[in-house]
Amino acid sequence: MIALFVTSFLIACSQQQIDPISPATEVNLSTAAARRSLDSNATLKSVATFPVGIATGSRLVAQNRKAADLVAAQFTSKTVYAYMSIEPTQGTFNFGESDYWVKYAQSHSVRLHGHCLVYHTGAPAWITQLKGNTNEFEQAIKNHIQTIVGRYKGKMKSWDVINEITYYNSGAIAQTPFRKMYADDKSYMEFVKRCFLWAHEADPDALLFYNDALYEVSPSKVEAIVNMAADFKRSGTPIHGLGTQMHVDINTPDAGIRNSLLRLASTGLLIHMSELDICINPNKDAITAISAKMNDAQQNKYKVVASLYKQLVPGRLQYGITLWDLSDADSWLVVQKNRVDAPCIFDANYNKKPAFYGLLEGLMN
């Protein structure tokens, strides 16, 4: 996951202005045309042939009725934040976020996917700066994994076991604090395999995923992960799926998306499009308005991405498409990165954008 858990922050997008405070209504020709061609009452989950998920925090749903209604109406899968900060000090866990969604699932027809058990970014200092030896480090990680997975045994359908072990622009193993605990890449990768084994021991029925980003622009990364998956299979490591985050923009080449999906699916593992959003301002320009051209490009890209996933990933391997953040008000690009952008399918007032209709049409194709 590129982004960490973020809190709500308002940014409204209209044809005239991008305003982080004042609400605005986005109405343009793109939305009108889309509504004429598609049933405006159709929901994502009503047209999809696989689970459609959302990654958002419990606070937003608990405090914002419109957001809560959208989550219930549109989605059949929920990515549950379970970063390593869930254990802020060694042996002390805060299960509030994940417990909320387990309780939510008891009254809503929704699949739960945990994200993510091992991830260096945002991990608490006690683990990234551990003074012990490798054995002590691994014991701490094993306890972390098995405490969490064991608590939600039979409740979380699946887990991202480990996230982003490679550099963003290549398939080389990144020199993270966890990698630096080991003498070489081979030793580190044996640790990565053990992470999957520990999760499997805690819940043998849970589906286990490796999750990473930017496959669509890095063929070398795709090949590295395809090779990793083959090695896992040969060694009997319990891996069931690959997550392709799909943080893309309106200019991301369709060919890169196509090729990455084909190669990842060639592993025979489940493929989860796990963190989809599409930014409209990739050059980080100082824009003051979102043009109809930008909206049209975003709408088309959402359509293309969903269509390619549906057409290229065999049905038996389609674990689903999950959107990262619900609206432009709470997008990680806006809140965490302070960017002027609008990457989601709902605007800052939680209204459907042209992008919603693009995704809807792609799911129908």
Image (cartoon, rainbow, N blue to C red):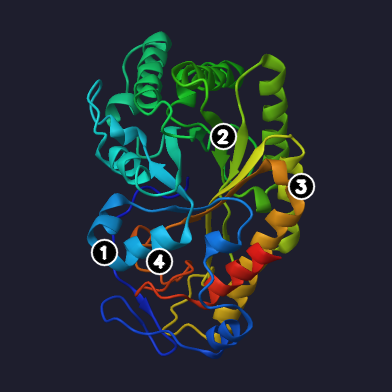
For marks 3 and 4, the one nearer the N-term is: 3
Q: Nearer the viewer, mark 1 or mark 4?
A: 1
* Circles 3 and 4: CB atoms closer than 8 Å: no
Q: Mark 1 points at which residue?
A: 64
Q: Mark 2 points at which residue?
A: 210
Label 3: how many residues lie within 10 Å, few (<14), some (14-19) or many (20+)? some
Residue type, label 1 = Asn
For marks 3 and 1, the one nearer the N-term is: 1
| 275 left or right of 347 in image | right
Q: Distance between the residues labelled 1 and 2?
A: 32 Å
Q: Which of marks 1 and 2 is in front?
A: 1
Residue type, label 3 = Leu
Which image quadrant: the C terminus? Answer: bottom right
Q: Mark 4 points at which residue?
A: 327
Badge count: 4
Q: How far apart are marks 3 and 4 (CA)?
A: 29 Å
Label 4: how many residues lie within 10 Å, few (<14), some (14-19) or many (20+)? many
* Circles 2 and 3: CB atoms closer than 8 Å: no
- Asked if 210 appears above or below 76 in the picture, the reply is above
For marks 2 and 3, the one nearer the N-term is: 2
Q: Which residue is drawn at 53% across and 16% down?
A: 183
- The front one of 119 and 327 is 327
Q: How far apart are marks 4 and 2 (CA)?
A: 26 Å
